[in-house]
Image: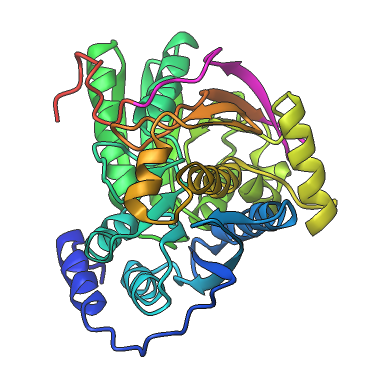
Amino acid sequence: MRRPLAVLVVAVLALAGCASEPPVAVSSSTVRVGLLHSLTGTTAISETALVNAEKMAIEEINAAGGITVDGTRKKIDPIVMDSGSDPVRFAKKAKELVKWNHVPVVFGGWSSTSRKAVLPTLAEHEALLFFPAPYEGLESSANVVYTGATANQQVVPAMDYLKAQGSRRIFLVGSDDLFPRTANKEIKSFAAANGLTIVGEQYRALGSADFAAIVAKIKSAQPHAIVNTLTGDSNAAFFAALNRAKFTSSALPVLSLTVTEEEVRTIGPEVLAGHLVARNYFQTTSGGPNAKFVQAYKAKFGDDKVTSDPMEAAYVGVHLWAKAVAKAGSTDVVDVRTALSGLSYDAPEGRVTVDGDTHHVSRTARIGVISADGLIDELRNSGRPIAPDPYLKSYSWWKA
């Protein structure tokens, strides 16, 4: 039986407080960092490749001489841990990294429940988390750098696009977790202010593969479009159920906030072709930095591999941290946080800049369509990086 979110968070915090691992010696020639992602479980379909991207960024930095800390050149030494698609395990492993392995920074995370569960540990031990997944917003923390999109950089552009396409009747499908429920609350506020009607809202537990009843409700509701916030391998079951019911992408487009090239590769483009994606980076994004990024990734991990939005955000996070360390001359969290404010990086998606007040980065919003070759072709972009507005202060229709 699914545990309520409040109970889950209490359990996470209780477990995170009882770790009793012995301290680990730290080498003077390296700086340890943590890579914490789900390599097993329901979100492994999405997260495994993020570790590859982070390792590639670390290897690039080390090949260029590493980082300078207190006047000494040091190499970055990553410690990889598996959070197992479980917020409780995420909190436990994060504490092992920052307390016992003495890492000043962790790159990782996927779900908002996991991110929130680890915030007390980060604050207690003064460590940073670079969080690469898009999320619902309504948060800022001195101990988190949000390189994934916040709501005004993904959710709002997605709804603007559907409105412009004449989709007035919207059905919401998501995993029963914090990001889908909060994003859909934001979508409902947008809809009420913009003449759209939410004709259905359905959730399934993480990892669920039973979508027959939801597809029946969709058929009855007759929406113009579906907004999808399912997490991990539930996407495969949902789209398969739509296909069995003979819903085509042309007749009923699904606009996904949680699908990338990685999910398309795993699920199959023959299932997903023609459906829509709202993200900030695609493998097909034009520009020199991206061509170099894609080429390097394929050369290292294989021509059959793809790059994706959260992978790019994970890769960017490592480079931003290294640039901040170089600027500060230190891995001290306070020094690095100060150095990050206003720091820019020419990312594969284009230039991103860290906002010192909210610790989010500017990102270019993109809408794409999944093609038969498994890639995502851009249909529209915002034309410039969008400054982060995690609390949606600039939108009169939002009431928290």
Percent position (x, y) of residue 38? 50, 66
Task: Determine which quarter of the picture holds residue 76.
Answer: bottom right
Label the magenta part by its dominant secondary structure: loop
Q: Is residue 26 shown above or below 258?
A: below
Percent position (x, y) of residue 361? 43, 32
Q: As rendered, which of 181 and 148 lies closer to the eye? A: 148
Left or right: 231 in relation to 249: left
In percent of the image, x 65 and y 23: which residue is there? 378
Percent position (x, y) of residue 327? 50, 41
Q: Residue furthest front?
A: 71
Quick check: is 241 in the magenta stretch?
A: no
Q: Is residue 114 shown above or below 298?
A: below
Q: As rendered, which of 246 and 21 lies closer to the eye? A: 21
Left or right: 396 in relation to 368: left
Range of magenta residues: 370-388
- Looking at the rendered image, the quarter that the N terminus falls into is bottom left
Percent position (x, y) of residue 326? 53, 46
- Looking at the rendered image, the quarter that the C terminus falls into is top left
In percent of the image, x 59 and y 54: which residue is there? 67
Q: Is residue 214 visible?
A: yes
Q: Is residue 373 visible?
A: no
Q: Is residue 96 shown above or below 285?
A: below
Colouring style: rainbow
In percent of the image, x 69 and y 27: which residue is there? 285
Task: Determine which quarter of the picture holds residue 3.
Answer: bottom left
Left or right: 184 in relation to 212: left
